[in-house]
Image (tube, helix red, strand yellow):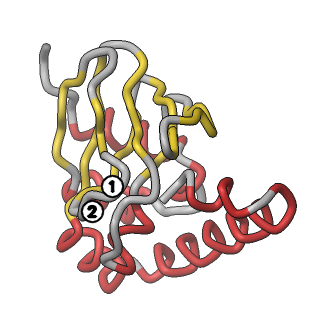
Amino acid sequence: MPMITSDHRVEVLAKVPLFAAFSHRELRKVAKAAEELHVHDGDHLCEEGEHGEWCFILVDVGARVTVSGQALATLAPGEICGELSLLDGGPRAATVAVEGDGTVLLVSRGAFLELLEEVPSLVGAVLASLGERLRTANAVGANAFLAVS
């Protein structure tokens, strides 16, 4: 499978809600920090309880989120998962399995933390995302919040 171009990475990132308000320059910084991973149907991006070292941006695949074996959510291409573990260093609260064959962009914990310093709008975007997840958790219960960490 060929690698996606830097310009395509920027296009993908621009569609991710977390990065939607970013400038082209900021998106390029995020794209540069990301690594590419080719995945296959059923591959696990992260396992519940493991230490989180990466967040994942779904380029052209979906994923299902489970906690204790119970399905909680479905993620679509363009969505991100795993970033909360990068912020607090805590264990993964859910297992995320890929649905389909395709590409995922990975951002390591170190690169993510550097991006928080280099791209000030990322701090606001992460805080807004956390606020949205907290509101969802309050509305439907704690499992909704846990499902996306």
Looking at the picture, which amino acid does disc 2 mark? Gly
For disc 1, the neighbor class at 10 Å (few under 14, some 14 to 19, many from 20) is: many
Q: Position of residue 122 (x, y in %)?
A: 47, 73
Residue 111, located in which quarter of the rendered image?
bottom left
Q: Mark 2 points at which residue?
A: 52
- Residue 35 lies, with reference to residue 49, above or below; the image says above
Q: What element carries label 1?
A: strand
Q: Position of residue 77 (x, y in %)?
A: 49, 29
The amino acid type, in three-letter code, at marker 1 is Cys
Depth order, front residue of 120/88: 88
Residue plotted at (57% across, 71% down): 125
**Of 101 and 78, the residue lying toward us:** 101
Q: Where is residue 5 in the image (x, y as percent from the top left)?
A: 21, 32
Q: How crowded is mark 2: few (under 14 residues within 10 Å), some or many (20 or more)?
A: many
In this view, the residue in front, 140 or 136, is: 140
The residue to which callout 1 is attached is: 55
Q: Is the C-beta separation of discs 1 and 2 under 8 Å? A: yes
- Residue positioned 42% across, 56% down in the render: 24
